[in-house]
Image: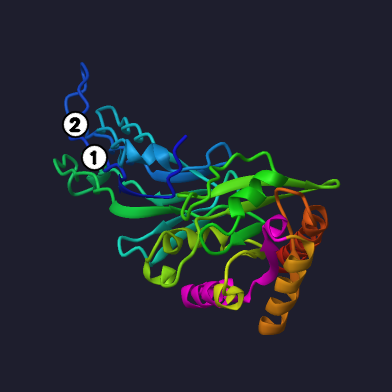
């Protein structure tokens, strides 16, 4: 299935049905009164999250969604039927944006979450509604109220616990493949990964989700490369795993490039907890890899872990450390939700 994380759709709720002009007609009833019923309400546009979807690919083939209009009122004081709602199913983590692609209209993060995005128009009144003591045979009725229209952007931000960041060809996909059942494309050239990949890690009895996004380059926050579009997928993560290729020349420069892009992008990415790992240690050997880690640690004044996804060096301890951070974050979120509910 092709991954698609943003799509523009056009929505329209149903208009209300018109009221009816009718008069009671029956044998031996000479002057039957008005009995025109009201029109039915137009259908709403409802957006619902489901956990069986993980891409917006369906919206590439259908962009227009309309709810059913309300039915006409009828004689004998019969109200028209309401129009059927239009229910749009989206993946968990979908953000609804206005046409400017910046204004957030809704953020859907829970499975089964439903919102009435556009309300249908109310039905019009039939002539029975306008009967008074001075006007006992009104011929007045009102048409239904119009529905609402909107053009919106859907943007999917994956729900993951750990986000992999780094320059292109830093070994992110290899790491994901080595510790999960995910099978991302792996090759020895930049931008092998063209769309985000998810993998589930089992650390002991604890499970968490890792998101691998295309590599970042300098200027990614301005749209250069692929990173600008996909950085949103690591916004919701508990921790960032920053992978740096130990075989490249300027390790501190590689680290600073990614940090600058995270800070420029914003949305709290620069404040997230971060673990730094030097990858491909098997290509250098233990001693040279340790020297590279020591040099990088001195330059950035942060702890650096040396790993090899191919040789499985230090992978298990790293996963358990990530699991501990994710577990703590989940506990804090549950406590904060309890506090808000009280």
Q: How crowded is mark 1: few (under 14 residues within 10 Å), some or many (20 or more)?
A: many
Q: Locate residue 112, reporting x and y percent.
A: 58, 43
Residue 240 visible in the snapshot: yes
Point 73% across, 67% down: residue: 288
**Label number found at residue 246:** none
26, above or below 113, in the image: above
Identify the residue at horizontal 29%, vertical 53% (top origin).
151
Mark 1, residue position: 126
Magenta-tinted stretch: 256-284
Rendering coords of residue 13 (x, y %): 31, 45
Q: Position of residue 189 (x, y in %)?
A: 48, 52
Asked whether residue 260 is drawn in magenta, I would say yes
In the displayed structure, would residue 96 be above or below residue 240?
above
N-terminal-most mark, 2 or 1? 2
Q: Mark 2 points at which residue?
A: 22
The one nearer the camera, 2 or 134, is 2
Image position of 302 (left or right of 147): right
Circle 1 SS class: loop
Figure coloring: rainbow
Binning the other alpha carbons within 10 Å of mark 2 as few (below 14), some (14 to 19) or many (20 upward) gives many
Q: Does the rendering let one see residue 159?
A: no
Residue at point 27%, 48% (across, down): 147
Q: In the shown orientation, is residue 198 left or right of residue 59?
A: right
Tell me whether circle 2 and circle 1 mark residues in contact (CB < 8 Å): yes
Q: In the rendered view, would you say 97 is above or below 179?
A: below
Q: Is residue 32 magenta?
A: no
Residue 211 x %, y %: 60, 53
Give SS at disc 2: loop
């Amino acid at each position: 299935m092709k991954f698609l994380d943003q799509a523009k759709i056009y929505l329209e709720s149903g208009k209300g049905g018109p009221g009816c002009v009718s008069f009671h007609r029956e044998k031996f009833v000479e002057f039957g009164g008005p009995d025109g019923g009201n029109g039915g309400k137009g259908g709403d546009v409802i957006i619902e999250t489901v956990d069986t979807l993980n891409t917006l690919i369906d919206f590439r083939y259908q962009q227009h969604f309309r709810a059913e209009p309300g039915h006409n009122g009828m004689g004998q004081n019969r109200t028209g039927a309401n129009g059927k709602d239009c229910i749009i199913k989206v993946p968990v983590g979908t953000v609804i944006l206005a046409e400017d692609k910046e204004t957030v209209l809704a953020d859907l993060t829970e499975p089964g979450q439903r919102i009435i995005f556009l309300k249908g128009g109310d039905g019009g009144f039939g002539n029975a509604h306008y009967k008074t003591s001075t006007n006992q045979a009104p011929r007045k009725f009102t048409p239904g109220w119009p529905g609402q229209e909107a053009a919106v952007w859907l943007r999917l931000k994956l729900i993951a616990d750990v986000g992999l960041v780094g320059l292109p060809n830093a070994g992110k996909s290899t790491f994901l493949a080595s510790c999960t059942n995910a099978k991302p494309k792996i090759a020895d050239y930049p931008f092998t990964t063209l769309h985000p990949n998810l993998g589930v890690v089992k650390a002991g009895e604890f499970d968490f989700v890792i998101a691998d996004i295309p590599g970042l380059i300098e200027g990614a926050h301005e749209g250069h490369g692929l990173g600008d579009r996909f950085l949103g997928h690591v916004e919701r993560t508990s921790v960032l795993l920053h992978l740096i290729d130990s075989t490249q020349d300027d390790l501190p420069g590689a680290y600073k490039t990614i940090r600058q892009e995270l800070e420029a992008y914003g949305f709290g990415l620069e404040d997230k907890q971060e673990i730094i790992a030097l990858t491909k240690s098997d290509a250098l050997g233990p001693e040279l890899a340790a020297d590279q880690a020591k040099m990088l640690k001195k330059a950035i004044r942060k702890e650096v872990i040396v790993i090899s996804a191919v040789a499985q060096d230090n992978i298990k301890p790293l996963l358990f450390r990530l699991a501990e951070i994710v577990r703590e974050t989940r506990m804090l979120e549950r406590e904060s939700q309890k506090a808000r509910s009280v």
